[in-house]
Amino acid sequence: MGGNIVKATPEAIAEAAAIIKSGGLVAFPTETVYGLGANALDSDAVERIFRAKGRPQDNPLILHVANIREAAKYAEINPTAEVLMHQFWPGPLTLVMYALECVPEITRGYLDTVALRMPMNPVALALIRETGLPLAAPSANKSGRPSPTTAEVVADDLRNAVDMILDDGPTSIGLESTVADTTGDAVAILRPGGITREMLAQIADLCEEEDDRLALRSPGTRYRHYAPALPLLLWTGEDLEMFERIAGMKWCYMGIQEPPAGSYRKIIFHSMEEYARKLFLALRELESCGGGVIVAEQPKDSGIGSAIRNRLSRAAGR
Ligand code: TXA
Ligand code: MG
C-alpha cells in the first residue's frame, strides 16, 4: 500500500483517521491547498512530516482543529484572536497565539507560540473530528516547491512518504491561508492569503505593512519558496521592453492581461480568484512545457492580489 490516491468517501476518511491515530501520515484536502497531516500531539509522527517534506525543523506547523473549543486546548486565546475566530472560522485564516504546554516543541518549531486554523473543507473537518485530534499539517509538497492544489500533485512530490492521499478534487482557493500573529498590541499579517488585509482591518487593529520584523516572526518566510524549475520574471503590465529582451528564449506566460505576441505557451486567467486558484498548478505546468523562462503578471497589491504577489515574488526568489 502506501501513498495511494483514494477518493474521500466516508470509508476512506475513517481509514485515514485510523492511520493518523496510529502515528501515520495522511495527505488531505483543505479549501486552500492539500495538507500533509499527522497527530500534532505525537512528536514522532510530526518528525516524520518534517522528514517527508525535507523541511527545516525551525519552521513550525499549523494545528488544524474542528472548532473554537478545541483551539482553547492548545493556545491561550486572547480577545483579538477570539473575535477573529468568530468572524472568519471556518476558513483560510491561521492565528498565532501563545501555546499551551501540551503542544510538543517540535510541532511549534521550539517557539512559545502556536499557529491554529479551522479549515472549511468538509473532508478536512470530517477527518479532524474522526481522529479527535489536532492535525499538524503543512502544505503537502516537497519543501521549497509550489504548494499542491490537487491530489495528483501531492503524489508527484510525496507518493513514497505518505501512507494515504485523500482526494477531493482541486482546492477552491488555491493559495495557503492568511497567517496573522495576534500576540502583539496590533495584529501582524505574517503571510497574506484568502482572508485579506482589508477584511481583517474591519475587525482588528493591524500593524503597518512591509514591517521587516515580520519576516523574523514567521520562520517560514526566511526560506526560498514555491521555486519553479525555470527562472521566473514578474511583469507589471507596462514594461514591454522586457519581452524584447527575452524574445529568443521560448518564454511562457501566465496572467490576466494578454501578453504581447510571441509566447511559447500561455495561460490566461479570467479573474483574480482564478489566478489564485490555479497559480501553483500553472507554475508546475509551465516549468515542464519545454520553454526557457516563465513570465507572470504581477497583480495590484490589494485583496487576493496581495497574496498572489507574495507567492510570485517568493517564487521569483526575491
Ligand atoms: O492553508 C494553509 O495554511 C495550509 C493548509 C494545509 O492548511 N498549510 C500551510 O502550512 O500552508 P505551511 O506549513 O506550509 O505554512 C505554515 C506557515 C509557515 O510560514 C510557518 O512559518 C507559519 O505558518 N507559522 C506556523 N507556526 C507559527 C508560529 N508559531 N509563529 C509564526 N509563524 C508560524
Ligand atoms: Mg508550505
Image (tube, rainbow, N blue to C red):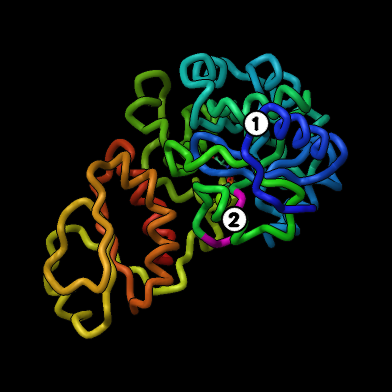
The tag on residue 141 is: 2
Q: Position of residue 220 (x, y in %)?
A: 57, 52
Crowding at mark 1 (Cα within 10 Å: few <14, some 14-19, many 20+): few
Q: Which residue is at a point 75% across and 59% down the rendered structure image? A: 51
The tag on residue 9 is: 1
Q: Position of residue 19 (x, y in %)?
A: 81, 39
Q: Which residue is at a point 65% across and 48% down the rendered structure image? A: 5
Q: Which residues are magenta?
A: 140-145
Q: Quadrant of residue 113?
A: top right
Ligand 2 lies under 8 Å from the Cβ of mark 2: yes
Q: Which residue is at a point 39% across and 44% down the rendered structure image? A: 277
- Depicted 10 relative to depicted 2: above or below: above
Query: First in sequence: mark 1 or mark 2?
Result: 1
Front residue of 12 and 114: 12
Q: Quadrant of residue 78?
A: top right
Q: How many marks?
A: 2
As for residue 262 lying within the magenta part, the answer is no
Q: Image check: 84 left or right of 157?
A: left
